Amino acid sequence: MEVLQLLVSGLANGCVYGLIALGFVLIYKATEAVNFAQGDFMMIGAFVSLGLTNAEYMDLPFWIAAPLAISIMAVFGYLLDLFVLRHLFGQSQTAVVILTIAMGFVLRFVAGLIWGHEPQTLESPLALGDLQLGGVVLGMADVAIIIVTFLMTFFLYQFFQRTKLGLAMQAASQNQMAAYFMGIPVKRVQGLVWGLSGATAAVAGILFASKGAIDPNAGLLGIKAFAAAVIGGFGSLPGALAGGLIVGVIEPFAARYLAAGYSQIAPYALLLAVLVFRPHGLFSQVRVKKV
Amino acid sequence: MRIHFKTSYAHDIRLFPDRWTLSIYGSLLVLAFALPYLLDEFFLGEVTNVLIWAIAGLGLMLLTGQTGQASLGHAAFLAIGCYANTILIEQGVPFIIAFPLAGILTGLIGVIIAIPVLRLHGIYLAIATIALSVLADDIIVLTEHWSGGVSGKFPEMITIFGFEIERWSMPSRFYYLVLVVTIICTLFYRNLLRSPLGRAFAAVRDSEVSATAMGVHIARTKGKAFGLSCMITGWAGALMGYYAGTFNNETFSLVISITLLMMIVIGGLGSIHGAFFGAVVVAFLPQALSILKDNVVGSGVAIPGLETGVFGMILILFILFEPMGIYGRWLKIRTWFELFPFARKDMFRRQKSYLKTERLR
């Protein structure tokens, strides 16, 4: 029963990592760049929804505030691409990496200025009550997180596989010039995917803030989400979720069964092991080009 | 405008292209040695800090600017250098042996880490090095027996043949020590660039495919770059330990790694000058900000995260408008004056490039 309880709580945590990792993978799939500020996007999304919902700020009903926060973050992502990232079009990945790290710093600073550095919780209807399932206690927020994450992964996967826009995004990342020739507006497509990942980050933020307190440094969670995305293999949406779940499940088990001090190493040790033995992740998308 | 007629290979690889450059760097050196007589102790300490950061920047520059491998984990190697030096001295090894040994040890550990890690490309490498940096913190806590863990360590006073050097009581002696190490590292870096290995580094950075075609062994070259980079970083780490006076597991955190990378980007990737310019920015920014803040909002008002926030903004502006950093801007200004009135706007324009996926190779 203890194992089951650890497993379930790990799954809920893992879903949050998975959601952030989804944001990385979305951007990576469409622009071949990595947004190191995705964790901070999530933090901003959480704070925006908190600012709209909580009584001391805007005091809107949650079910109006949540879609509003998601759309605000989508617009934010699109504008960020329009005004900042588009200048780097065609430059090396390293430039984007450094830019997004810097963006993370700035976002953390701005969030601290607006909402302060005290941890705050979202007044969310998801946060109420626990669910008892044969001895396993599960918070309602955890259940919501698990359901939403799986739905998001499913729909985003379908979006990339089935819709015209999703395919255009994949094409734009595989070969920008060829995509241009095929009539894909590459820059606008990239802007849209930044918007999409902003929306994903907002969903992750709302769920995360329903589960516990957030502060401007909550974005540092992004590092664990990185581990998740890499373990799953950058570029694979189900891989990102799987990676998130693996990292999430390993953590409580390591904390329970390993000596203190070794437990927080576990996710990173796993990350390094995956990188050494399967350098492109468990769900590798790297294929050797055949002529 | 100066025109260099190169009539032999030796001409081409000279350290200084002409007398003018030599005299500029010569006078800079004289100024550096005279500095303790010109500045008071506080500013001398700050300059020492700049030099230490510059050494660390040179270390990372070798890897990122020269070989093109972005590392977000160099704080781990700062830590290794610092702890190796302190532990060796505690074991009774004299400083004059322990200090170089600490760097070499860091380099060796770097090579061992590089073997699996450098198979990775681009972002995977960046993420693996982030993991290294996070792990270093935990490993220091776990090896408490040697490293002192959370409670940290205090480096002992430096003694070179009975000559004592200490950061607080004799800042000018410590300054000279750091200056000498800086000069050695800079000369080492500069000479490395003139050697076949240095060219191999640049070849790997510019195009791995063409480097292979020219007979450069990619993995081995990257490994060497990692090792040499870690060696210089290790020395910087050891000096940083002396400068701080005390250090523990949190001294060399991920933030230091990121700051280091941002520093060389602001300074200008791929140039020795860049490491120094970046170090000046990193070392003086906190002071400048606190003076500015005191004047604008009054002292006593704390704005948490101000430094990193402003640092991030400066970095974003640089990447957007001057990707070659301070040194790149300086080159442009200099070229404009040298070619006056023939400088054209498009002289430094980059070629347009289109991205292709890394997932198909």
Image (cartoon, rainbow, N blue to C red):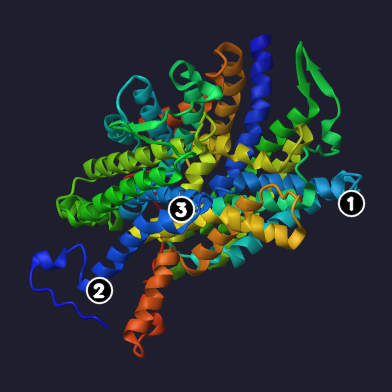
Q: Are tags 1 and 2 found on a single chain?
A: no
Residue labelled with disc 3: B47
Question: Residue B20 got which mark?
Answer: 2
Residue A94 seen in the current view: no
Question: Residue A58 got which mark?
Answer: 1
> Judging from the image, what secondary structure is the residue with disc 2 in?
helix
> Judging from the image, what secondary structure is the residue with disc 3 in?
helix
Residue beneath the point at 16% across and 53% down: B196
Residue B160 seen in the current view: yes
Position of residue B62 relative to residue B248, above or below, is below
**Chain letter belonging to callout 2:** B
Residue beneath the point at 65% across and 55% down: B290
- Left or right position of B259 against B233: right
Instruction: Name the spot of residue A267 as percent of width and height, x first.
Output: 52, 27
Instruction: Name the spot of residue B325 as percent of width and height, x first.
Output: 44, 64
Going by the picture, which residue comes out furthest to the bottom?
B341
B257 or B160, nearer to the observer: B160
Quadrant housing residue B210? bottom left
